[in-house]
Amino acid sequence: MNKRSILSSIVIACALPVMAGGFLTNTNQNALFLRNPAIDAYMRSIEGVYSNPAGSAFLGRGFHLSLNIQNAKQQRIINSTFAPFATGIKNNGNPSKEYVGKAYAPIIPSFQAGYNTGNWSFTASFGLTGGGGKCEFSEGLASFESIASLLPMMGAEQLGIRSYNMDSYMQGRQYYFGLQLGAAYKLNEHLSVYGGGRLVYATTSYNGYVKNIQIGLADGKMNPASKYFMDIHDQAIGVAAQLNAGAGQHRELASRYEAAGDAATAAGYRAQAAQYEAQAAGYTKQALEMAHLSGATENVTLFCDQKGWGFTPIIGVDWKINDQWNLAAKYEFKTRLRLRNKAANSASADNLAALDQFKDGKKVAEDVPSLLTLGVQYSPIQSLRLSAGFHYFDDKHATKYGNTQELLDGGTTEILAGAEYDINSRITASAGWQKTNYGLTDKYMKDMSFVTNSNTVGFGVRVKLTEKVNLDLSYLQTFYSTYDKKSNDYNNVSGVASIVIGQERVNELLSNQQANPFVGMDSFTRKNRAFGIGLSIDF
């Protein structure tokens, strides 16, 4: 039997994309995006350099600068249902439990800058192109607790276990800083092209534990699980040793009686020796099971920092058909990213195959997917601009540790629409919408790392403070759908159950359509909102 931990996988990629984009891509780079996400063909000011870098060639001559701050808050919410949860001391007999991960980023800075000579525009931008905060699950996750919750079910008859208790916690932080440099060239009055790249610096950390796993017996007393199982192991080893010693003595007596010609008595001693040996084998088996359970219920602590560099080549084109129509496209190539671990994990964590990804010194694949964006802007009258966009993130070809990208059905698609209206010469109002669909599958979705499809709306205003200075104020909120995942082997708990009740019994239970005790369900969703303020200056 393979040793498996109660904490079969403690780490989650729970540092969240702040707003929008693929699994490791934030498209919200300024306050302009928050008040209208559909800016893929935007070319009126320097903020568009991230979404439509080729459009910067059509800006006025001189230096342009935009400074932005965002404030974002997000929650991950998982409603988990698993019958054994009812035996948890903290769960009050309820088989359902809500796990909430909270992420808050009080200040997310970014800037966009450019210098336009007439035909050439040299631009730079800096921001959080992935991640963007710290997410904390103060009570851990269902994948942590579901294994511990099996202890009463597995040990009720043999060991008298009636309940369990545990402490668990998980925190993840993820920042992907991106510095983008490039140049746009205006081929003529209608067409411009762009070439450049983004240097990506990734820094992440994961801090979590499962500890103080306890089991309650019929007398109501809570006992440290690992010590309890090891005590039984020691007792079983002692009994097995005594039985084996007795078997040896009886075999020796059988040999003496055989030598004396008393075959009947010798046969009796040999039968007794065989009985002792069979009993000893049973206790040895129990000792092995208890050793597995003792190891599986040890405290596990994880603390891992990861750092790495990557580079993203970027190309773009903008076609200004006339004063009413503008079309734009951008392609960001895949970013090859390898993160190196610096870890201070407990020995119990380093001994687990499930945590190999976070061993000290290990390099981990974490590519950022390629991105294609298409945008169109139409101005039926001078004061009104209507816009639409399309994004495609090629998530299936961005390599992740363990090739988890192969579990997806496809890449991420986004459809965007928005409008901007000049109320008067000083105030511009705008609003926009974005629909995001991921190629999700049940195999990919885990409480340790998940997203759900969403609709995002944003709105805000631009105030012209002077002829050269503008102020953006904006708000954005995302409405996530709920993804339900039902499993006949919830978090693969049957693997731990087989240690105690055997694989044959586990297979029998799994095949029971009416009373499979390993059935469970997770319902995943999120909440998200952000505020933004930006100041743009034309020098």
Image: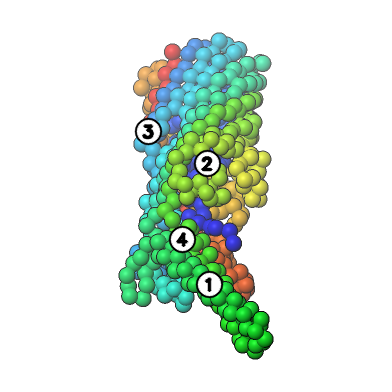
Q: Secondary structure at mark 4?
A: helix
Q: From the image, state whether disc 1 or disc 3 is nearer to you.
A: 1
- Residue placed under numbered mark 2 in the picture: 359
Q: Toward the viewer: 526 or 224?
A: 224
Q: Toward the viewer: 48 or 209?
A: 209
| Residue type indicated by callout 2 | Lys
> The N terminus lies in which quarter of the figure?
bottom right
- Residue placed under numbered mark 3 in the picture: 107
Q: From the image, state whether disc 4 or disc 2 is nearer to you.
A: 4
Q: From the image, state whether disc 3 or disc 4 is nearer to you.
A: 4
| Residue type indicated by callout 4 | Ser
- Residue placed under numbered mark 1 in the picture: 245
Q: Toward the viewer: 14 or 508?
A: 508
Q: From the image, state whether disc 3 or disc 2 is nearer to you.
A: 2
| Residue type indicated by callout 1 | Ala
Determine contact: label 3, label 2, CB under 8 Å: no
> Hey, which residue is sitting farthest front in the picture?
260
| Residue type indicated by callout 3 | Ile
The answer to whether residue 224 is visible is yes
The answer to whether residue 457 is visible is no
Question: Taking 279 as reference, is 145 left or right?
Answer: left
> The C terminus lies in which quarter of the figure?
top left
Q: Rate crowding at label 1 as few (under 14), some (14 to 19) or many (20 or more) other CA atoms within 10 Å.
A: some
Q: Secondary structure at mark 1?
A: helix
Q: Alpha-carbon distance for marks 1 and 3?
A: 71 Å
Q: State the image coordinates of residue 115 (x, y, percent, origin top left).
A: 52, 14
Determine contact: label 4, label 2, CB under 8 Å: no
> Hey, which residue is sitting farthest bottom in the picture?
264
Please tell me which of labels 3 and 2 falls first in the chain: 3
Does residue 90 lie above or below 75 as drawn? below
Q: From the image, state whether disc 2 or disc 1 is nearer to you.
A: 1
